Amino acid sequence: MSNDVILLTEAAALQIKEMIKQNEEEGAFLRVAVQGGGCSGLSYGVGFDHEVKDGDIKFEQHGIQILVDKESAPVLQGTKIDFKQSMMGGGFTIDNPNAIASCGCGSSFKTATNAGTPEEC
């Protein structure tokens, strides 16, 4: 497994850098994780963190330091995070090749090997 668990596009990195600046999070890592919950059983956790934990996979793309915990890494392997801008505004997209099903709102998913624990929507 490559150390680069996910692919962060340049557009996503530019938006994340802006968010780091706006939120005064200089020096923070971008933590990407998978947690139980959501309609389909698993959901994404994305946020800033200032601490590297035991077992974290650490890598850098486009000047962004990224952390993924070892439990989330297999589920996230090959995931692409992008930022799309449209006339209605912009937003992050997550394209996970391991997801075999997702809920209607697109915020939760399941994989062939991990269905998680679904919650009512």
Image (cartoon, grey):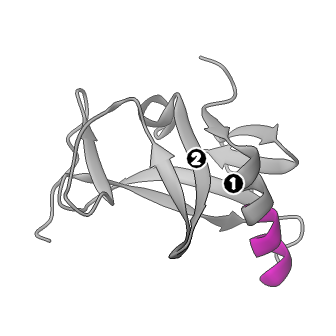
- Residue 115 drawn above or below residue 97: below
Is residue 63 visible from the viewing direction of this image? yes
Percent position (x, y) of residue 104?
A: 19, 59
Q: Which residues are magenta?
A: 16-24
**For the residue marked with disc 2, what is the amino acid?**
Ile
Residue in the picture at 76% in, 53% down = 13
Q: Is residue 52 visible?
A: no
Look at 43% across and 56% down and name the residue there. Answer: 44
Residue depicted at x 84% and y 44%: 62
User: Label 1 crowding class (10 Å Cα cut-off): few <14, some 14-19, many 20+?
Assistant: many
Check disc 2: other Cα within 10 Å, few if <14, some if 14-19, many if 20+: some
- What secondary structure is marked by label 2? strand
Q: Write down the residue under mark 2.
A: 81
Q: Earlier in the sequence, mark 2 or mark 1?
A: 1
Against 100, residue 117 (above or below) is below
Would residue 17 be counted in the magenta stretch? yes
Up the image or down, 45 lies above or below 8; here it is below
**Which residue, given by chain and number where applicable, does mark 1 sit on?**
12
